[in-house]
Image: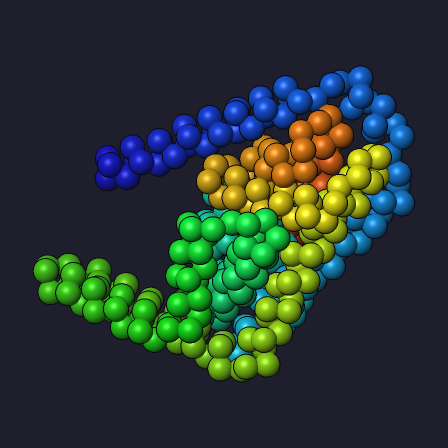
């Protein structure tokens, strides 16, 4: 128990350090007078365009989860949307992985099947993002290893399940039978949900198209916000900034990726005052504003005010 607490304490310290480093980097590349001028001369048309792109991003992400949820259980689209929006709020108060896991509870039904439906959609997005990184940005080696592992999880899920189940069974024979029996039950339910969700080939193919659309919408969002502040960002640099944003936030472990997300974008599109303003505005439009909406959705859900 002490080791777990120590590990959690270390993660918190590293997250705080990552936040301070990110904010320090962004402050160092920001001129306050230029920042004020850029904000005064911002184009509302491009900001409105970015907001519309963010709405599409949310709706398509919800649709991707929903099409897999339909394969494993009956869940209304409205309930899926409410749970997804709640996730934005949960990831501001919890680590991202915990936030994702918690929002699944809100859709009801079998938790592990619903979690599998979410995981398979996210996995297709990871495949698309890594593929784009190889083609347009030139990521190699480690990225290739990750891509291969992710593809194996999509193609060879039965073999992976059997390996993990065998390991748990072996662990159970070593004297932890009660715990391993429970874990094997969870693993089986998750595997069943994953397999059933994949059986619909049309839904599986559609998930890749939706993942591509979700990524492109966010990349175009960076371009649109940049233009709102008079900053020309090419699609290639915007894609690089988006990838760096995801990478930095994943490594930092900061709730909502605050600071790390923005630093990744700035590194990708080129450090400057306008780049910093672009990064924070983009993240507000595409994420933080939905954290506010998600807080309302979450407390309505847990308070029973959302109905069915």
Q: Is residue 155 above or below residue 14?
A: below
Q: Residue at x 49, y 76 (%)?
A: 197
The number of callouts visible is 0
- Identify the residue shown where x is 68% and y is 48%: 236
Up-down relation of residue 70 to residue 91 (above or below)? below
Residue 299 percent across, percent down from the top left:
60, 50
Give the colour scheme shown: rainbow
Residue 104 appears anywhere in the view: yes
Position of the C terminus, as image quadrant, is: bottom right
Measuring from the top left, give residue 271's x and y in whole percent.
67, 29
Residue 245 in the image, given as x and y percentages of width and height: 58, 42
48 with respect to 68 (left or right): right
Residue situated in front as seen by the camera: 243 or 198: 243
Q: Is residue 89 visible?
A: no
Q: Is residue 292 left or right of residue 16?
A: right
Q: Is residue 151 above or below residue 201?
A: above
Judging depth in this view, the residue of 83 and 225 nearest the camera is: 225
- Residue at 80% over, 39% down: 232
Which residue reaches farthest left?
174
Q: In x, y percent, where is residue 119?
A: 48, 63
């Amino acid at each position: 128990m002490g080791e777990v607490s120590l590990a959690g304490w270390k993660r918190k310290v590293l997250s705080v350090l990552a936040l301070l480093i990110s904010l320090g980097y962004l402050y160092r590349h920001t001129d306050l007078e230029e920042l004020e001028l850029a904000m005064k001369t911002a184009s509302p048309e491009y900001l409105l365009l970015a907001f519309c792109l963010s709405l599409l991003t949310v709706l398509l992400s919800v649709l991707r989860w929903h099409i897999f949820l339909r394969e494993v259980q009956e869940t209304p689209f409205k309930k899926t949307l409410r749970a997804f929006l709640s996730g934005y709020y949960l990831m501001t108060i919890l680590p991202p992985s915990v936030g994702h896991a918690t929002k699944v509870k809100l859709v009801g039904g079998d938790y592990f099947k619903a979690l599998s439906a979410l995981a398979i959609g996210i996995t297709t997005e990871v495949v698309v993002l890594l593929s784009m990184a190889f083609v347009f940005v030139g990521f190699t080696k480690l990225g290739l290893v990750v891509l291969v592992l992710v593809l194996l999880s999509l193609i060879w899920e039965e073999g992976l399940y059997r390996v993990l189940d065998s390991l748990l069974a072996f662990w159970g024979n070593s004297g932890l039978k009660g715990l391993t029996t429970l874990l094997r039950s969870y693993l089986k339910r998750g595997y069943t949900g994953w397999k059933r969700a994949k059986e619909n080939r049309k839904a599986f193919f559609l998930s890749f198209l939706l993942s591509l659309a979700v990524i492109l919408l966010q990349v175009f969002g960076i371009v649109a916000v940049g233009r709102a502040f008079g900053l020309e960002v090419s699609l290639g640099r915007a894609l690089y900034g988006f990838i760096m944003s995801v990478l930095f936030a994943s490594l930092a472990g900061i709730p909502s990726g605050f600071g790390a997300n923005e630093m990744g974008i700035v590194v990708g599109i080129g450090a400057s005052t306008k780049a910093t303003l672009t990064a924070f505005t983009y993240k507000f439009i595409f994420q933080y504003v939905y954290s506010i909406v998600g807080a309302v959705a979450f407390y309505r859900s847990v308070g029973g005010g959302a109905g069915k």
